[in-house]
Amino acid sequence: MSLDHPAVARAVVRELGASRIREVANVGIGRDDVLPFWFGEPDQVTPGFIRDAAKAALDDGDTFYTHNYGIPPLREAIAKYLSALHQPLDASRVAVTSSGVSALMVLAQMIISPGDRVVAVTPLWPNVSEIPKILGAEVVRVSLQFGQTWELDLQQLLDALTPDTRAVLLNSPNNPTGWVMPRVQQEAVLAHCRRHGIWIVADDVYERLVYNENSNENSNEQSSEQAEAHPCAPSFLDIADADDRVISSNSFSKSWLMTGWRLGWLVAPPALMTDIGKLIEYNTSCAPGFVQRAGVVAIERGDEIIDNTVARYRQARDYLYESLNALPGITAPRPKGAMYLFFRVDGVSDSLALCKQLVRDAGLGLAPGNAFGAEGEGYVRWCFASSLERLEDGVQRLQRFLSA
């Protein structure tokens, strides 16, 4: 057999890092005594009225292809929902995708070419930072600063956004740190990117999961009553013009407890929409119709879910924050948003090995900090989208492990 032409993937694909979160989870496969907090997933099933909508759509025979951009009722519902949170937004700028990750891939394929320079604010969920590499781009990382909370050195980011930069990747509220980008920083970044023609890619999947009282800094056109009814993190959609080089990706996974449904969307400038339709066609063609029907119901009736979820997660966050900081050798900054505590463990230089050991010896499943980049080494991510009882059990397991 000749080995002159080995059957291997492209070099950039071979060089991608495999998910270290999955690597840890694989250690616990088949064990029913492990408490899993490694994935960004709630411990609650999708509410019944959303599941019922999907069942009804299936019973009605909704099993055929739909429009590349999504069914009109869902696009209209998303536009109405976003208009209440941010500025008025036309449904023609909304494209439905088969998951938030698919939205990120489509928008990256839209604007990123081999050799492009892309800046990412990190630590960051690896799917976001690795997608540009698949397309042959160089990713430059600007790390958040560790302290009482995670914070961004704005000048450091602006210095990294040189005129030859193609795009900046921003996830706020952030996975894994819970950092929330303040409005004043968004305004500075938008002005800078306008001057240099840099694309802003905003991963807004956690925008409804905010806990500090001052996170809701919406546009001046929105009334205080609207802001109170629809709290969210500051967003570039609040301040960007329709034709700005700003693209927002989002998902039904987190706010509506729909992780397994694989339904998302993106918002883009009008000039991109025709080409976005082509890319959706060549990636997935369309999201399943019956899943989209469930998405319509989730959007229209989902505020009750989000309000309950935020209240539940705030209580879980506060409990876990106090409990972890009471343990020796652990420093846990207080997250302002999302659904994670990203905490430092003194003396740890290999968080992947630590998390594997926690699974084997303590039955506790956490995500290693180095899964989110080299700047995450020495840290561990704990998803607190869980009941207090499960969190308490997990803290006790960690305490016994650390004291052994």
Image: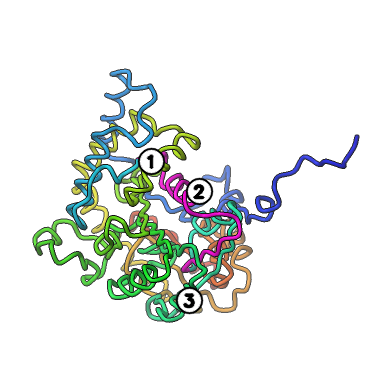
In the image, taking residue 225 as reference, residue 393 lies left or right, namely: right
Above or below: residue 181 compared with residue 282:
below
Disc 1 crowd, CA 10 A, few/some/many (<14, 14-19, 20+)? few
Asked whether 393 or 116 is in front, the reply is 116
Above or below: residue 77 compared with residue 336:
above
Residue 115: horizontal and vertical position, in percent?
A: 60, 60
Please give the residue where the numbered disc 3 appears in the rendered image.
Answer: 330
Residue 314 visible: no
Residue 362 visible: yes
Measure the C-alpha gap from mark 2 to mark 1.
Answer: 14 Å
N-term mark: 2 or 1? 2
Measure the C-alpha gap from mark 3 to mark 2.
Answer: 40 Å
Residue 341: horizontal and vertical position, in percent?
A: 41, 66
Disc sitting over residue 109 in the figure: 2
Above or below: residue 342 compared with residue 130:
below
Quadrant where the C terminus is found in the figure: bottom right
Measure the C-alpha gap from mark 1 to mark 3.
Answer: 50 Å
Quarter residue 175 falls in = bottom left
Disc 2 crowd, CA 10 A, few/some/many (<14, 14-19, 20+)? some
Identify which amino acid the numbered label 2 is placed on: Gln
In the image, taking residue 280 as reference, residue 246 lies left or right, namely: left
Asked whether 76 or 351 is in front, the reply is 76
Please give the residue where the numbered disc 1 appears in the rendered image.
Answer: 274
